[in-house]
Image (cartoon, helix red, strand yellow):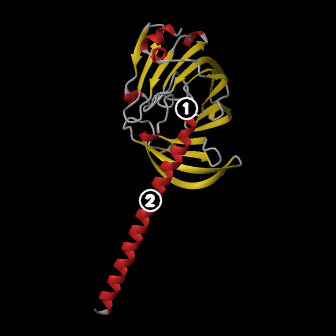
């Protein structure tokens, strides 16, 4: 074999080895990202059902604050996504408005909105779930549970956030109607709790930052954040959810999460 042929042969072997190394590295990153997401999701299992009272603060770019009060119920569904219903108590312009969500592991989530002024239940189309929820910085999509199976994952790096050692993973929504092209998620290494999410819009710009604070443990194993904030970096507004009372094992059933229950929830 001539020297030139030997050179190209060796270069081919090196390139092949590098290609395999990068491919294996990508596979490891994807697997690690998925495993971290699964461990984090374990924090949402075994609670059965829960009821909460909450406030939602809408903060304008100038700092003006509008406060809303609402009730929130949640039902764990084995082998599928959870069900939830949120009902606004005040102020008067949103009193009685309710949203019912059925999260699914594989299929698109089902959501219905009850508008008391019209006395009707409106189904929310999948392509509209990226829109703002009642003027807040949360979208209808944000109000549904983030099932692990609905994303592709990649481990990005380790990073400290507010003094906590965290994994940073990237997840890409599989839903073609998602309002996000990707999300970067900070998950602490100690308890695998989500600390922060960067949401990127359909143009891949950093649209919103969501933070989770004031975690409390219930039932000896279930972690509940008592403060969730969503900051919109494009319009300067933010919305904050604050949980004031949380209780579990209230005996809720599927009947409490039906379309008829939306009308009875006023």
Q: Say if 16 sits above or below 86 in the image.
A: below
Question: Which comes before the other along the chain, label 1 or label 2?
Answer: 2
Q: Is residue 211 left or right of residue 254?
A: right
In the rendered image, which quarter contains the C terminus? top right
Measured as percent of width and height from the top left, residue 250 is found at 59, 18
Q: Nearer the viewer, residue 228 or 137?
A: 228
Q: Is residue 43 left or right of residue 173?
A: right
**Within the image, what quadrant is residue 113 found in?**
top left
Mark 1 vs mark 2, foreground winner is 1
Q: Which mark is residue 46?
A: 1
Q: Are marks 1 and 2 in contact (CB under 8 Å)?
A: no
Residue at 53% across, 10% down: 96
Secondary element type, mark 2: helix
Q: Nearer the viewer, residue 193 or 134?
A: 193
Q: Say if 73 sits above or below 24 in the image.
A: above
Q: Nearer the viewer, residue 37 or 184?
A: 37
In the rendered image, which quarter contains the N terminus? bottom left
Secondary element type, mark 1: loop
Q: Is residue 208 visible?
A: no
Number of marks = 2
Q: Is residue 256 visible?
A: yes
Measured as percent of width and height from the top left, residue 86 is found at 54, 19
Q: Which mark is residue 16?
A: none
Circle 2 sits on which residue?
26
Q: Say if 215 sits above or below 87 in the image.
A: below
Mark 2 neighbour density, 10 Å: few (under 14) some (14–19) many (20 or more): some
């Amino acid at each position: 074999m001539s020297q030139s042929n030997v050179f190209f042969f060796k270069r081919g072997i090196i390139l092949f080895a590098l290609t395999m190394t990068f491919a294996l590295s990508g596979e490891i990153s994807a697997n690690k990202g998925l495993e971290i997401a699964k461990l984090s999701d374990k924090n949402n299992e075994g609670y059965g059902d829960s009821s909460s009272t909450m406030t939602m603060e809408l903060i304008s770019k100038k700092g003006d604050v509008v406060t809303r009060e609402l009730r929130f119920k949640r039902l764990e569904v084995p082998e599928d996504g959870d069900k939830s219903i949120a009902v606004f108590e005040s102020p008067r312009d949103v009193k009685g408005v309710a949203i019912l969500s059925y999260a699914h592991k594989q299929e698109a989530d089902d959501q219905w909105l009850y508008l008391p002024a019209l006395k009707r239940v409106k189904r929310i189309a999948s392509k509209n779930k990226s829109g703002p929820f009642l003027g807040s910085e949360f979208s209808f999509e944000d109000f549904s549970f983030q099932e692990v199976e609905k994303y592709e994952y990649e481990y990005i790096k380790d990073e400290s956030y507010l003094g906590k050692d965290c994994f940073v993973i990237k997840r890409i929504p599989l839903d073609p109607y998602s309002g996000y092209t990707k999300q970067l998620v900070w998950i602490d290494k100690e308890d695998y709790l989500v600390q922060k999410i960067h949401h990127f819009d359909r143009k891949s710009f950093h649209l919103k930052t969501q933070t989770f604070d004031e975690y409390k443990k219930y039932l000896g194993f279930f972690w509940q954040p008592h403060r969730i904030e969503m900051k919109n970096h494009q319009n300067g507004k933010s919305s904050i959810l604050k949980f004031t009372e949380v209780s579990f094992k209230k005996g809720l059933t599927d009947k409490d999460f039906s379309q008829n229950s939306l009308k009875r929830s006023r």
